[in-house]
Amino acid sequence: MNFDERQESASAAAPVITVSALNQSVARLLERTFPLTWISGEISNFTRAASGHWYFTLKDDAAQVRAVMFRGRAQYANFVPREGDKVEVRALVTLYGPRGDYQINVEAIRRAGVGSLFEAFQRLKEKLDAAGLFHPDRKRALPIFPRAIGIVTSPQAAALRDVLTALKRRAPHVQVILYPTPVQGQLAAEKIAAAIDTASLRNDCDVLIVCRGGGSIEDLWSFNDEEVAYAVANCRMPVISGVGHETDFTICDFAADLRAATPTAAAELAATPRADWIGSLRADVVDLRRAMRRAFNDAEQTLDGYSRRLLNPSAQIGQQRHKLQALATNMTHANRAPLTQARHQLDRLSGRLGARKPEVAGARSVLASLQHRSAISINTQLSQRREALGALASQLELLNPQRTLERGYAIVTDEQGTIVRTPNQLHADTTLTLMLAEGSAQVGINAVQPGKAGSDPAGV
């Protein structure tokens, strides 16, 4: 088999795919290979379809690529791009299958350079927030009745006309003081901060409005300055920030005491409409009159009630006299009835006591006889007891050891005070105590010789 035949055979064995399958495979390959990424370029051939989708070409000096941004993503964009705009898009690289065109599907879009500006905005915001510049405790309440309102903006700004128109309509009586300053361009931030410091130093107004109209992030960048933020935070009077439109946020908004969506809204927040105050005062007057009328009516009714209850002094004295007589009568009856009842009860008890009174004359005779007999018996017993006591005293006198000692006897005790009764209790070279009829004596023992009773066994 030659080379041509082998090639035809291999070609016949390889699978055959359709164009649609090829484009789908290429699209999946591109989407897997290139993740979402930011791409910068210039807008060209921009078209906004009736469906809401955006179609345009993104190009630079050397190349271009077709781009599509579907309605679900385009509705979140904060601007509509125009021909020649420098933009940055976050897109997915893919392939449009029906035509086989290579394109990008845009997820988000921003003006060129906005990314770095937004990062700088975020860094400054985090720095000032950490320093406590945005803390809610630093926010001050707006005055209820401002005498003068200060405005920091450009004299040529449309925002100034909007604020003045709103203040003239709502509070024509309030004085307006303008502190002119550029709101865009080089050195604008320094001049804005200087105007705020001037307003704070002069202290001519009760509330200060810092405002300008809407624009791109570059147009509003002067209000994203650290010096402006500190000037707003250190201002002597409350500050309302009305910079840009409702979707625009600046560092000045966070540092201010109150943020307004627009300059006109800032004017409306600074001054309550004069008509509202007048209407409120009129309503208060009506309520006050109604309350006073109700109080007078209540007082008149109370006075009528007191007048009906008030009596003539003579009539009141007569009424009190009748009342006193009635009380005296009641007191007399109240005292008489218990007294009469007590008398009847006393008579009844006296009768019962007389019926039960014992005869005491006979009992007194018996008691006297008993007393006489008791006295005789006691005297007899005392005589008998005295005689018995005398006999016992004689016997006791006979047994008195003192009498024995007086007859020449002695009581012998050893050194421990024990009475010596036998020779066995005596030892040589000991001292004995002899208790005599009159006094005592101590003697020493030289030797002990046991012997019969009645003999002298010891040598003293």
Image: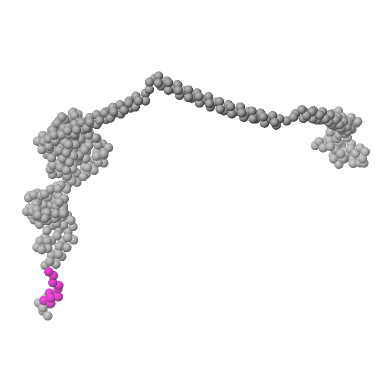
Q: Residue at x 12, y 74 (%)?
A: 11
Indicate yes or no whether the magenta region holds residue 11: yes
Indicate yes or no whether the magenta region holds residue 345: no
Nearest the eye: 144 or 396: 144
Question: In the displayed structure, does residue 4 sit left or right of residue 129?
Answer: left
Q: Quadrant of the C terminus?
A: top right
In the rendering, at what x and y percent does residue 307 appear?
A: 34, 24
In the rendering, at what x and y percent does residue 223 appear?
A: 17, 39
Question: In the displayed structure, does residue 237 sit left or right of residue 384?
Answer: left
In the rendering, at what x and y percent does residue 325 appear?
A: 48, 22
| Residue 9 to residue 77: above or below | below
Q: Quadrant of residue 448?
A: top right
Q: Give the residues in magenta.
A: 8-18
Colour setup of the view: one colour
Question: In the displayed structure, does residue 327 sit left or right of residue 192?
Answer: right
| Residue 108 to residue 408: above or below | below
Residue 249 seen in the current view = yes
In the rendering, at what x and y percent does residue 14 appear?
A: 14, 73
| Residue 387 to residue 217: above or below | above
Q: Quadrant of residue 281?
A: top left
Q: Quadrant of the N terminus?
A: bottom left
Q: Residue at x 16, y 57 (%)?
A: 92
The residue lying furthest to the top in this view is 314
Question: In the displayed structure, does residue 404 sit left or right of residue 19?
Answer: right
Q: Quadrant of residue 193?
A: top left
Q: Residue at x 14, y 52 (%)?
A: 74
